[in-house]
Image (spheres, rainbow, N blue to C red):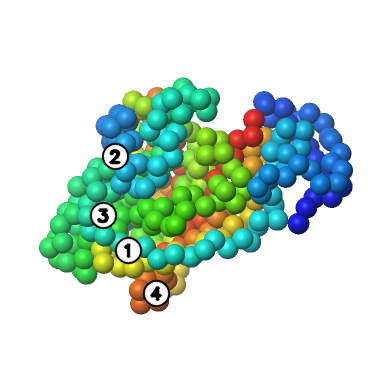
Amino acid sequence: MCMSEGRLDLARNDGQPLGRAYVQGSPDRRGGSYYVQGVMMLDKSKIGFEFASFTADVEKGRLRFFAKAIGETNPIYTDEAAAREAGYRALVAPPTFTMVLDMEGPEFLPFLDLLNMDIARILHGTQEFEYFAPICAGDSITVTGHIADMFEKKGGALEFVVMEQSYTNQDGELVAKSTNTLVHRNG
Amino acid sequence: MSDIQVGTEIPALELAPISRYTLALYAGASGDHNPIHIDSDFAKNAGMPDVFAHGMLSMAYLGRMLTNWQPQAQLRKFGNRFAAITQLQDAITCSGKVVEMIEQNGETLARCEIQAVKADGEQTLVGEALVAV
């Protein structure tokens, strides 16, 4: 899909609107983005895009390393006997660990290329998790994700990409869902 | 009977100041290798004063606070927005309290407001958790 004639609100670096500009024909497109007078606009036709799903193994060494990195000292995250005593079948993954699974895909941050985003300009805006069952060492988790929404604020100085992910274990059980918003700074 | 009710405070979690070592470990363990968190040259070229903390590191700290308080298996929902960047040497404190008791899918949930703040009181993460009680 390409943008034909349309009007865009442009923005100065401080986020104040510059006024309106007419876009005629196909703007300069590189990757998944539009450049309008030097201001990059993310390609909203990618709303709904489904990323390739993949399966990641939950390794106990990785869980211990993650626990160390976040300063977690509760033994259910590092000691298998303690985890079993607490009712888990193996070491349990902490609440934010699904983010680690996201990074196990074939491509690091696949939305970067898709939307031609600059990694130096992205910030994490919001993050929400919903939990249905534990993720434990030894699990194989299939990660599926899509772009749920894209919008802009401050006349396009900030663009937002909302992504939703689902995590399903080796038994076909949905264990968690994630919704997160990334902010791309255009200014 | 649970003694959790509206107004119950979640025991706070105080963290050591964020160091480059903390960020390097988190980058390795999480798989988030975005150089903006571990490479000062890259961060400065991007217009930042220096490397800064992964938002998800602070969210993991909030998660620790929650699971120190109640077993993780009781956590139903956990979310936040990232309100400010956590810089090197910032000492973060996580805190929260129960603001509402709700019934959902046949169980009683404590809706908790949670936050991470810097030593000067600036909020870095502001969010909510639903915990079955």
Query: What residue appears at the point 57 percent right and 48 percent down from the top-left corner?
Result: A113
The crowd level at tag 1 (other Cα within 10 Å; few <14, some 14-19, many 20+) is some
| Closer to the camera in the image, A87 or B113 | A87
What number is the disc on residue A173?
4
Disc 1 target residue: A57
Residue at 26 percent of width and 67 percent of height: A138
Q: Are marks 3 and 4 in contact (CB under 8 Å)?
A: no
Which quadrant of the figure contains the N terminus of chain A? bottom right
Query: On residue B25, which mark appears?
Result: 2
Q: Using the rendered image, report if marks 4 and 1 lie on a common chain.
A: yes
Q: Is residue A42 left or right of residue B55?
A: right
Nearer to us of marks 3 and 4 is 3
Mark 1–mark 2 Cα distance, whole angstroms, equals 20 Å
The x and y percentages for residue B79 are: 45, 51
Task: Please name which of the two marks, 2 or 4, marks the residue nearer to the observer.
Answer: 2
**Above/below status of B121 relative to A57:** above
| Marks 4 and 1, the one that precedes in the sequence | 1
- Amino acid marked by disc 4: Glu
**Secondary element at tag 1:** strand
What residue is disc 3 on? A63
Give the Cα distance between marks 3 and 4: 21 Å
Q: Amino acid at mark 2?
A: Leu
Badge 2 and badge 4 both on one subunit: no
The image shows a total of numbered marks equal to 4
